[in-house]
Image (spheres, coloured by chain):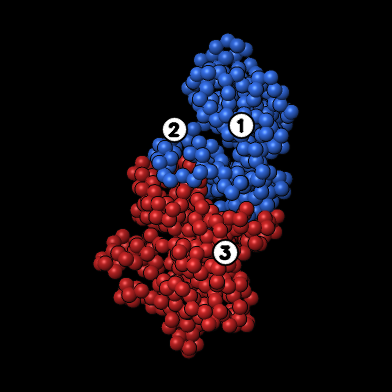
Chain colours: A blue, B red
Amino acid sequence: MDERAFLNALRTLPLHLGAAGLTDDTAMLAGMVVTTDTMVEGVHFLPSDPADDVAWRLVATNLSDLAAKGALVEGVLLNYPLSEVAWDGAFLRGFRAVLAQYDAPLLGGDTVSLPPGAPRVLTLTAFGADAAAPPRSGARAGDALWVTGTIGDAGPGLAIARSNQARDADEAWLLARFRRPTPRLVEGRVLAPYVRAMMDVSDGLLIDAARMAEASGLAVTVDLASVPLSVPARRYGSTPLAAATAGDDYELLFAAPADWIPPVAATRVGAFAPGRGLTLVDDGAPVPLPAHLGYQHNA
Amino acid sequence: MDERAFLNALRTLPLHLGAAGLTDDTAMLAGMVVTTDTMVEGVHFLPSDPADDVAWRLVATNLSDLAAKGALVEGVLLNYPLSEVAWDGAFLRGFRAVLAQYDAPLLGGDTVSLPPGAPRVLTLTAFGADAAAPPRSGARAGDALWVTGTIGDAGPGLAIARSNQARDADEAWLLARFRRPTPRLVEGRVLAPYVRAMMDVSDGLLIDAARMAEASGLAVTVDLASVPLSVPARRYGSTPLAAATAGDDYELLFAAPADWIPPVAATRVGAFAPGRGLTLVDDGAPVPLPAHLGYQHNA
């Protein structure tokens, strides 16, 4: 079953009020933000990825969802498949490092055994407190669309991970952007009380912008000329279109009134208007939409 | 790495106060009980188990942890690997049924794809409210050890599931005890304010009794003659020792003052005393401990 059909079926179940109709990456429970993500070996990470980096990425991607709500990190649950001593030991080192980096205490979890040869499947659940929790559906016509940091680093980073080797400092930096993403917790905390809508860019700038517009009942235009590429990504040969359709960047995407200047490092990449759908322009000139706007599960 | 070594390593990480040092099946967060369990195809359930029963068991085993805390069910998160339409559809039917049965609304979750041929790995996280939350460490010397329901049904049920066929009504009942366990939510709710220690019997009566004794800093004696076997289990040929060392029953095991009679259907199976370790007797006469007290991951 594809993800959309499964989600539509889930939406017919009795839902918790805090589930917000399963329209968001997070739920609200007892005043806490709750988010959970599963990573599968061979799907979300490579068998060759170092286990400490897998731990980092598993935690960081969940904390990114908390960042998009402006939450303080409260704690995490880990569901972990036990395997070789070396891999598990390296995972624990990375897990310790990322929990320390973001002041995320461990709440509990579960360990399991897998059948021999089965790909690892890891789940993390993260809890955040005191969140202003802007929805992804709150953009208004006339709002500007902004994104933090640079976009399109993790895409080349994944390609470099597949080649098993970073050949220079640029590639090492891009690889780290894929393997050790930075959840924008400080930026999210600063932005959340002021922005109208916010989410993290997990599947790609275009697809996530389109999702924010759809949730808000609006049209959105993204200007490729304004997509913030990093210097290493430019030198690697990446293009604004490639950057805007690659996933795994974990920057924050947000909507704010057109005259508001965000108090964090961010780039204005588009605008919302009445209507529906995504329009792409390059320095104002219309550009046809690519066949794939980003990453979609089972689609 | 084995489970014990991994847990010991996790205990050296920064822990949330609600993690209680990772000594319990549940954590406390913002006044809620939190528990999470992962089930792996080929380890925790059989590839031949019907998907609707897998959904039931996934939810029921987590709710059993809430029952042991005396909690009201608040909601669940599901981490689900998408696969064939027929399996996913059957899973959704069972998921709907078990959520409805126990008034458990869905809070959210995550869906992923697995590589072709990979065993399914499913995670559920459950939240409970208003829990008296007796610890597993609260037993006192002189307390009696009690268990709800009957013990040793799921063991034969698993053997019947492996044979792919229940040959009579007894076997069908035992199979259902394995595939569709009953979380003792009402019993847990009634007992929790009064008992000194409580946990669910997931890995086996003997191993779980030994764990409660160890957590409480006490010795415990279990009398095999008092282990409550069901009529179908007796007719199937099960013995008290087999019943006491088989897992997956999801009954409640609890410690209470010797003169207290529980207000739910339960059987007194042992007693706590100063000291350490588990002693087994049969109608009062000493019995040697079996090599395996129950199910242990990677051990």
Question: Farthest left residue?
Answer: B168
Which of the two marks, 1 or 3, is nearer to us in this view?
Answer: 3
Which residue appears at 49% of the width and 21% of the height? A277
Q: Is residue B110 visible?
A: yes
Q: Nearer the viewer, residue B65 or B211?
A: B65
Establish if A174 lies above or below A127: above
Q: Nearer the viewer, residue B282 or B77?
A: B77
Label 3 resides on the chain identified as B
**Sequence order check: which comes first, mark 1 or mark 2?**
1
* Three-letter amino acid code of the residue under disc 3: Ala
SS class of the residue under badge 1?
strand
Q: What x and y, as percent, mark residue A290?
A: 50, 20
Q: Quadrant of the C terminus of chain B?
A: bottom right
Label 2 resides on the chain identified as A
* Three-letter amino acid code of the residue under disc 2: Ala
Local crowd size for mark 3, using a 10 Å CA cut-off: few (<14), some (14–19), many (≥20)? some
Q: Nearer the viewer, residue B19 or B211?
A: B19
Task: Name the residue tied to disc 3.
Answer: B132
SS class of the residue under badge 3?
loop
Task: Name the residue tied to disc 1.
Answer: A198
Residue A231: quarter of image: top right
Label 1 resides on the chain identified as A
Whether callout 3 and callout 2 share a subunit is answered: no
Which residue appears at 51% of the width and 29% of the height? A215
User: What's the distance in space between the residues labelled 3 and 2, CA to CA?
Assistant: 45 Å
Q: What x and y, as percent, mark residue A184?
A: 68, 36
Which residue appears at 47% of the width and 47% of the height? B106
* Three-letter amino acid code of the residue under disc 1: Met
Task: Name the residue tied to disc 2.
Answer: A299
SS class of the residue under badge 2?
loop
User: What's the distance in space between the residues labelled 1 and 3, CA to CA?
Assistant: 38 Å
Question: Farthest top residue?
Answer: A285
